[in-house]
Image (spheres, rainbow, N blue to C red):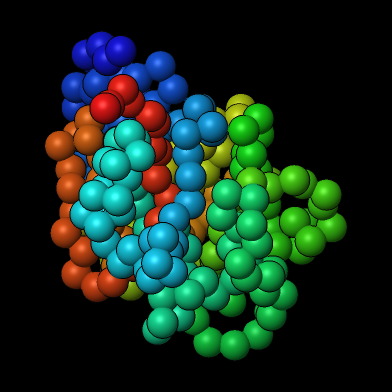
Amino acid sequence: MKKIGFCIAIGGVLAPTMTYAKLQAYRINQPIAVDVVEITDLSNLQLYLNDKHGQPYQDFQRLKTSLQPICKKMEFAMNAGMYQANLSPVGLYIENGVQQKSLNRATKGFGNFLIQPNGVLAWNANQAIITTTQKYAASNFKARNATQSGPMLVIDGHMNQNFLAKSDSLKIRNGVGIKNGKLYFVISRTGVSFYAFAQYFKDNLGVKDALYLDGSISSAVISDLNRFDRNLRPLGPIVAYTPTFKCK
């Protein structure tokens, strides 16, 4: 059941939110303009890539339409990691317990994915983790869903040292952080630098670890904020909060 409430946060102005038992969304204007979705209900958080015919969903509307016949609603969705031209994941990808792509351990090359350290977001019904690729490779975490991306924005409470405070590379960006078992999915509403984006996770959300998901193509569906982005380009992996509802 929903209930409407108001939130107050240091360093930002929050819009009214609609709060579900395990999901909360809010809009912040300072120090950077972002939309934030907090999720504690991991059982209804799922990765999606291909439809039942093996074809990529490519956009939020196709995913939403496919969920309706199986009595699931899409309350939140966001692009979930970097992908190739054919929309396949660049790195590790586990969906509903099935590994479709193995961990990518490359450390040199071109592109944001290879800015070190990169990392992994993984979760099962009981726990979520965000950690570097190296640490994930050494772990025995039993992931039901996992996506690899890069770079890490925050590592063990410290911002990635590769970011420049005075960078003029300003893009719409999205990422995810974790604190006390809760996931924070964040998407900027205006162009921001890596530094400013990572700083928001560290200083304003207070997360210990955060992972960059992508930039420029970043888009989201956030029902509580009446946000439904129309994708400018086809998407690869999508993370979505899709609880079941009663239907005939």
Left-right relation of 226 to 7: left
Q: Position of residue 181 (x, y in %)?
A: 61, 30
Q: From the viewer's side, name the closer residue of 89 and 206.
A: 89
Left-right relation of 243 to 66: right
Q: In which quadrant is the C terminus drawn?
A: top left
Does residue 39 appear in this view? yes
Determine whether 241 is above or below 166 in the image: above
Q: Quadrant of residue 60?
A: bottom left
In the current view of this chain or complex, which residue is farthest to the front?
248
Does residue 220 appear in this view? no
Residue at screen point 65% across, 30% down:
126
In the current view of this chain or complex, which residue is farthest to the bottom?
109
Q: From the viewer's side, name the closer residue of 205 and 217.
A: 217
Q: Quadrant of residue 20?
A: top left
Residue at screen point 28% across, 71% down:
234
Residue at screen point 35% across, 52% down:
78
Q: From the viewer's side, name the closer residue of 2 and 166.
A: 2
Determine whether 199 is above or below 28 in the image: below
Q: In which quadrant is the N terminus drawn?
A: top left
Q: From the viewer's side, name the closer residue of 212 and 81.
A: 81
Left-right relation of 83 to 13: right
Determine whether 83 is above or below 20 in the image: below
Q: Position of residue 40 (x, y in %)?
A: 51, 27
Left-right relation of 116 to 50: right
Q: Position of residue 208 (x, y in %)?
A: 61, 40
Residue at screen point 50% across, 66% down:
163
**Count of marks, rendered view:** 0
Q: Position of residue 153 (x, y in %)?
A: 53, 56
